[in-house]
Amino acid sequence: MKTQSYPAGNYNSLLLLLLILLFTGALNAQNKSVFSGNQPGKNSFTPTVPVHPSFISTGKFLGVSQPLRDIPPLTSDELKALKLKYSESLINEEDKERSYPFAETALPKGEDGAWQKEMGTQKLFRSPLLNFEGQVSSFFPSDDNGTVGRSHYMQTVNTTYAIYDKSGTLVAGPNNLNTLFGNKPGASRNDGDPVILYDEQADRWLVTEFSVPKDGTPNYILMAVSTTNDPTGTWYQYSFLAATMPDYPKFGVWRDGYYMGDNCGSGLTDTYVYERSKMLAGDSTAQVVGFVNTWRPGGTGGFRVVPPLDNDGEFAPEGSPGLYIAINDDASSGIKDQVWIYELAVNWTTPASSTFNRIQQIDVQPFSTNFGADDENIRQKGVSRKLDAIPMIIMNAPQYRNFGSYQTIVCCHTVNVDLKGRAGIRWYEFRKTTGNWEIRQQGTYSPDTNSRWMGSIVLNGSNTIGLGYSVSSLGEFPGIRYCGQSATAYIAGNSILDIAEDTILVGDASQSVYNRWGDYTSLSIDPTDDRTFWYTNQYATSSAPKTKIASFRIIDPLGVSTAAGGSGELVSIYPNPTRGVFRIVPSNKSGLTMNVVVEDEAGREILEKKFRGGNEYTIDLSQVAQGLYNIVIKADNWMETKKLVVSR
């Protein structure tokens, strides 16, 4: 045996490391056995050691699809045939059972401490801007989700896709999802659980679904990336082996990969990253790296997914690890009510050196996800059947944004607000300037006796938050609504959704046969203005679930939407009122490049101009009718909305 000597100082270092590890183990044991109350916003982090990959593989490049616009849509008979494929066996039986072994000691003991009991009073100018029918799903749940790009909106449901232009006109589909992947091994099935994301920085589209034969043959994640920014064109087709059955896969776009988390059970590979750069190029050597998340929240069993953050807008700083996020309910685990944040640092040159770690445990206002021991949770009008609230996880898709001097995370989940079965939506904004993530805002939205669940929340580039969700009660058929937070409230960081709730659909039926609802929805931001929200969700009919797609904007009630953390007006306009001609004068901002959009009271764009390098700019509205107009002014990292009166 070859021997090697070490300096004495290194022995001391090793001894210190051993003591730290022993102390860490003691802390872990203490956290598992002793429950203590929360101090919201504090970081009660228990140190952990990063894990290395449990799974490394190279995907199978299946080729390039034919243009989707050239594929005939499914006929009515083919759509009916999809219904015959549905089977209760597709549902993960483990998901139905929910365990809360620490319910007796769990907080809160009464009402949710972050409960917003009153609806916002600020009104939108016109909402929704668009509101049209999406696809009909033949499955329960529908897994309805969608996203908006520069010229299109694409929606996926179990188990079809459809593409619309921005006026709501269908331009491709509906067609089977696996049309995107062909009929090669691993891609011939059409099992569903789809996700659609728009990769803004690449100006491409990503569609995924799983292939789970349940007969002992391999499980796969199927992924397709559009070859251009036109989703009706061709797509690169990939099939990636999954280490185990990848139930409920959720994805996020990041600079160095497409990240995924799934619900496959404790001790199994459930966290993945796929090689984005090669997939965008149609490279046949794209890799996947997987990990066992040894810090899955909650107790044993049940439905547990730790989803990745989806990066909207500018990418995270170069070299930033991909982020994941989860909630931990003290009733399930005996540990505090917390939000946990994870990092995945991938090395595509040496994948085995990649790491995954839980980096923060953030105490939040106590919440309850305990609706009982099963998935009969949400009351409906006229039927005894209750719907699944899916309260154990962060809902699709938790959002990350990089604003330069600070970074944000916005996400939501469903809670039992009164411990009597009324569902509300707990939402958070986390912010990072330097060091750790910290809570900036948190609230639980439940302004009346209806349950609200199946939420999706995002922050746009104008400092306004949008939130879409389902609503139901004993006196209300399941419907679709949304609300939000104005830029004024956001800048104040007051944890209040002050934009009045609005309706996309008033339900006229309850879902009586199956209790699976959702299982997820999606709210996305239009990349052309970084301001308009697009939302899709399902609703009940006498037969199969149908879907709605709607868009809306939030106009700040005070007419000022400065950068978060800023104050004061950045531009002024005069004269106001005007007979038609008015001027825009930057406040100490001469030389800026500004984009100016003029909207009427209904939110319709009537004029757009770009200005560069001046001390003031003139716009002529002499040809428009008298009335009130919105002047939306945007430059770099700030935006203002002014009200202008045209009177003659």
Image (cartoon, grey):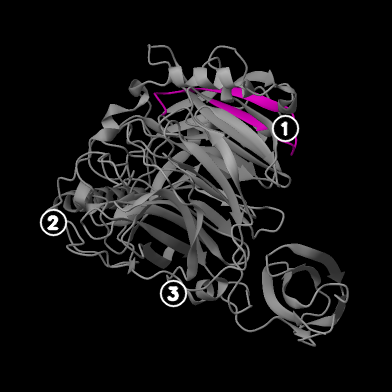
Q: Position of residue 24 (x, y in %)?
A: 25, 51
Judging depth in this view, the residue of 612 and 515 nearest the camera is 515
User: Which residue matches tag 3?
Assistant: 494
SS for dot 2: loop
Q: Which residues are magenta?
A: 222-246
Question: What residue do we see at 30% from left, 64% from top?
Answer: 365
Three-letter code, disc 2: Thr
Judging depth in this view, the residue of 113 and 439 nearest the camera is 113
Q: Position of residue 81 (x, y in %)?
A: 51, 17
User: Which residue matches tag 1?
Assistant: 232
Q: Mark 3 or mark 1, which has the lower sequence index?
A: 1
Judging depth in this view, the residue of 464 and 201 nearest the camera is 464
Q: Are marks 2 and 3 in contact (CB under 8 Å)?
A: no
Question: What residue do we see at 56% from left, 75% from top?
Answer: 565
471 to the left or right of 491: left
Q: Are marks 1 and 2 in contact (CB under 8 Å)?
A: no
Q: Mark 1 or mark 2, which has the lower sequence index?
A: 2
Question: Label 1: how many residues lie within 10 Å, few (<14), some (14-19) or many (20+)?
Answer: many
Asked if residue 346 shows in the view, the reply is no
Q: Mark 2 or mark 3, which has the lower sequence index?
A: 2
What is the C-alpha distance between the residues marked 2 and 3?
Answer: 30 Å
What is the C-alpha distance between the residues marked 3 and 1?
Answer: 42 Å
Question: Label 3: how many residues lie within 10 Å, few (<14), some (14-19) or many (20+)?
Answer: some
Q: Nearer the viewer, mark 3 or mark 1?
A: 1
**Considering the image in quadrants, where does the N terminus appear?**
top left
Say if 76 sits above or below 462 in the image: above
**Considering the image in quadrants, where does the C terminus appear?**
bottom right
SS for dot 3: loop
Three-letter code, disc 3: Asn
User: Which residue matches tag 2?
Assistant: 105
